[in-house]
Amino acid sequence: MAQITSNDLAPSEDTAEPPKTKLSVFVHDLCDEHPDFAFSRHWYKGKENRVGVEPWLDKKLFPGGKNQLGCAAKYDLLLPPMAPGDLGRYGTLVDRFDDTLPPYEQHAMVHVKIMLDPAEAWHVGFERVRSYARRHFAHRFAVVLFAHIPSLFGLKGQGNHIHCAVLSREVTINGFGGACTDLCSDGGYEAALAAWREHKKSWVDEAA
């Protein structure tokens, strides 16, 4: 007959933290049809003890770690015109999103990664992506942009690129609303890709 002894049990610790529910991801990666565009959806499978989007965003803000290669070359925050003013601060925006995302909402964000033309100054490419993000996403959603430019640190990396993180919940005059399932879907990917292709054709650098 099997018996349980004291050696079979881990010590009970009331302060032990339960396992974290991490973000799951589905990626439409770079490919021959769109070599400069990748789209991913991030969501939670579980309702309890979620990690939040902050760790993911912080890794983009500090790509080499806070004590190594420092901050992204440039970052920006875009909001709908009617958004409450306090959401214009990065820390407030991210904390508010994570703290108030209802347990029944699975969708957290989508992420667009756009590769920059190596023959063009990276800051010009950043403005093109920023304009695209404002037109396609930021009239309804909060968007955070991160420019990763490895050459600034003497690295080759994966080439110059911009990360565009779009939080899943619409922003109204009263703050965050519900998550948008259309944004976080195959249809959202197709619409974002079509908008990027059109934007590349029509965008003009106003500073030029």
Image (cartoon, grey):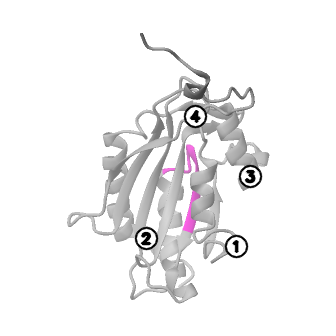
Residues at discs 3 and 2 in contact (Cβ within 8 Å) = no
Type of amino acid under label 4: Pro
Sequence-wise first label, 4 or 1: 4
Q: Which SS class for mark 1?
A: loop
* Front disc: 3 or 2: 3
Occupied quadrant, residue 204: bottom left
Sequence-wise first label, 1 or 2: 1
Judged left or right of residue 188, residue 78 is: right
Q: Which SS class for mark 4?
A: loop
Marks 1 and 2 sit apart, C-alpha to C-alpha, by 37 Å
* Front disc: 4 or 3: 4
Residues at discs 3 and 1 in contact (Cβ within 8 Å) = no
Q: Residue at x 39, y 64 (%)?
A: 199
Q: Main secondary structure of the magenta part?
A: strand
Q: Which residue is mark 2?
A: 203
Comparing 152 with 126, the one in front is 152
Q: Which SS class for mark 2?
A: loop
Q: Residue at x 59, y 61 (%)?
A: 59
Sequence-wise first label, 4 or 2: 4
Find residue 140 and report its horizontal and vertical position in percent: 55, 43
Type of amino acid under label 2: Trp
| The magenta segment | 137-146
Judged left or right of residue 121, residue 103 is: right
Type of amino acid under label 3: Gly
Label ID, residue 67:
1
Comparing 144 with 54, the one in front is 54
Residues at discs 1 and 2 in contact (Cβ within 8 Å) = no
* Front disc: 4 or 1: 4
Q: Which residue is mark 4?
A: 19
